[in-house]
Image: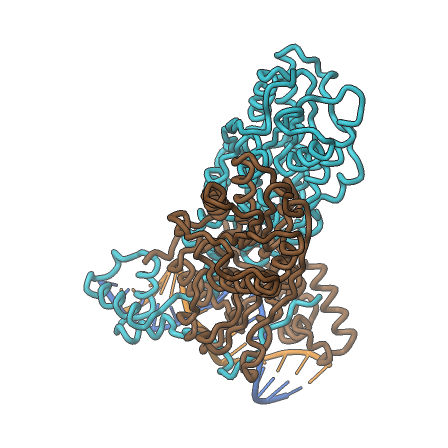
Chain colours: A cyan, B brown, C orange, D blue
Amino acid sequence: MHWQMGWISNRRGPHPHMAGVTILDVARAAGVSTSTVSNLLNGRTERMLPETRQRVESTIRKLGYRPNRAARQLRTGKPQVIGLVVPSVGNPYWGALARHVEAAALTQGFHVLLCNSERDPGRERQYVDELVSDGIRGIVLCSSLPSLEHVSSLLEDGLRLVAFDRTAQATDPVGLINVSVDNTIGAELMGEHLVSLGHRRIAFVSGAIRSINRTERFEGFLRALERAGIARQDVVTWPGSSVDSQFGDVEAAELGRVATTELLAGPNPPTAIFAVNDMTAIGVCRAVRDAGLEVGQDVSVAGFDDIVLAELYSPALTTVRQPMKEMAAAAFRALHTPQDDDGSGTSLLFRPELVVRDSTGPVAG
Amino acid sequence: MHWQMGWISNRRGPHPHMAGVTILDVARAAGVSTSTVSNLLNGRTERMLPETRQRVESTIRKLGYRPNRAARQLRTGKPQVIGLVVPSVGNPYWGALARHVEAAALTQGFHVLLCNSERDPGRERQYVDELVSDGIRGIVLCSSLPSLEHVSSLLEDGLRLVAFDRTAQATDPVGLINVSVDNTIGAELMGEHLVSLGHRRIAFVSGAIRSINRTERFEGFLRALERAGIARQDVVTWPGSSVDSQFGDVEAAELGRVATTELLAGPNPPTAIFAVNDMTAIGVCRAVRDAGLEVGQDVSVAGFDDIVLAELYSPALTTVRQPMKEMAAAAFRALHTPQDDDGSGTSLLFRPELVVRDSTGPVAG
DNA sequence: TTGAAAGCGCTAACAC
DNA sequence: GTGTTAGCGCTTTCAA
């Protein structure tokens, strides 16, 4: 139990608020009461004469007054802050999300509290608890947990929770909104692409983690292959390894590398590899090269997400684009929708887009 | 003037605080006064009997009490929050910083408010202002501005400001602390490395932005080359282009690409290219390949920063490592050092490390 | 060793 | 149309 630790104190009074001009100062200077100033601040301008309004507004400007959020929050219980819990902003995918969520929040005057769970369920839970006890009432959660039941009581208490990069599950608590790309369709598009290139022996590489995504992407992928006459059991997968458990920024790539090295060394290696996401795909590419093969030529490699690096990578990665900006904006917006609607709009699915670049090519003749 | 916009209201009372157990509830349940609880919360345990302490502590646990930060802040004027202003967390370099700063903050119970300036000076300034008016008294600022004079008045008011990725300048306001890697030494190491590989015709690629960094890296680089007998005027630079002005996540890479394409097309092209940072180096690599040449073989390419991607890139990038984790921790710590020290410790320089990977090799015979 | 009480800046009844 | 005022949850003197 250690909650303390303040700033090194400075030489000012007991309440050293910077720019310490309060609503009372404004009221006095403008010759009105604090209520009037407050009313103006809160858009209730119809309750005052235009001239009063003028006077107060100019006084605010003159004094450089800015309302104190802490006081406002204490009174209303509603801070102008949302929480964002991601595995790690060091990962470009989550970094991009954080950037766009922050941008969306900014348009409404909200700030974003950033939390990196490092894929630790305990930490994830603790963050949510802390945010709630900070009075925060809207959280975008990018959970690594398959079940979100542990937050259902918070939901019932009125917390607005949006789960990002995760589709709705049967056991989801009421009030939860999911924002995600349509993984199934995305993977299906990729499956079609690979098949159209003539590939028949195709592998799917992923870890066991992020399992909802994994499952959906795998299913969509299989669907496309089956339509092309490739049987489910002919699709190569990788049994997994110890790398799996300790995911981080680099581990996804490492997983791809290890898996691919094994796959390529085995009998009858695949001519194309679909990785569950771009970071993994990058690891796959590395292993392909390490095996003395050329990506896009000897072995086609595809990813999912279309992170910034995908385009920059060498060779540029064929992938499935998630419309991050739109998804982030939707996630933020969803934080403000009333939760006591009929419970219908529980999942927001976005349309993925196939992006063909240089890492995939026709099967080597 | 628009400050309002609350959450959709729910069915609860006028002060719908979630988990609404207050210090008073605890006090009553434990049969003590609020002061005692507060004392405990703030580590003043010596002011009470061990048994009282026991009782209060268990009551806190039983009731699931968590102090309300807004109220605490209102009272103390000191929120347990710091601000972090970066160009964009979408960029892996800043993403990594954000991750490590947040981790450092967490160890002391602090949360991090994330702000993306998108390299817009106006936005950067506005963010700082807002954070201050939120009562935040510690900010890590990753500014794109060469001068930080516009915040000097805030500094005088007691704001703790740490400028990251920037070395001290003569015009810096008093109280500012700079945290940065030693760019000069880092670039020098890289210069030596390239020279030792036999390269004599070497180019330096950068944009005009991030100019303090750029200057220092360029100077250090030149120093190493001059020592090897390569004259300053023989070092190839790139005059710059319009890309320069509109930097973003991808633009650094784009800059590297454009510059390199021109350099390689010119007479007497360089055999090695040192880019001002890794993102730019990635663009350089792309251009090298586009020109039909092999990175590390025909042309050596080096970067600076050692972002996650550097290792993952293909070929893995030779670069200069910044100890981000340590730097981030130091930046957070610096937020708590008294500003009214003698003004000496105004700059924290970290030791860079040369990381040789596959993108550099001996000059082609 | 513990408690009573004032007050941080703001909002929203409610009174005028 | 405008003012008065209670009180959000907490910390911190000051008194007991």
User: On the rendered structure, is A114 left or right of A276?
Assistant: left
Relative to residue B136, is residue A247 depicted above or below?
above
User: The N terminus of chain B appears in which quarter of the rendering?
Assistant: bottom left
Residue B130 lies in quadrant: bottom left
Q: Residue furthest top?
A: A229
Relative to residue A227, is residue B190 depicted above or below?
below
Residue B221 in sight from this viewpoint? yes
Residue A18 lies, in percent from the top left, at: 44, 74
Q: Nearer the viewer, residue A87 or A193?
A: A193
- Residue found 44% across the figure and 64% down from its top: B128
Q: Nearer the viewer, residue A43 or B259?
A: B259
Residue B138 lies, in percent from the top left, at: 53, 68
Residue D15 lies, in percent from the top left, at: 59, 89
Residue A198 lies in quadrant: top right
User: On the rendered structure, is B311 left or right of C4?
Assistant: right
- Residue found 71% across the figure and 37% down from its top: A209
Q: Nearer the viewer, residue A306 or A347?
A: A306
- Residue found 49% across the figure and 82% down from its top: A12
Numbered marks: total: 0
Relative to residue A3, is residue B337 depicted above or below?
below
User: The C terminus of chain B appears in which quarter of the rendering?
Assistant: top right
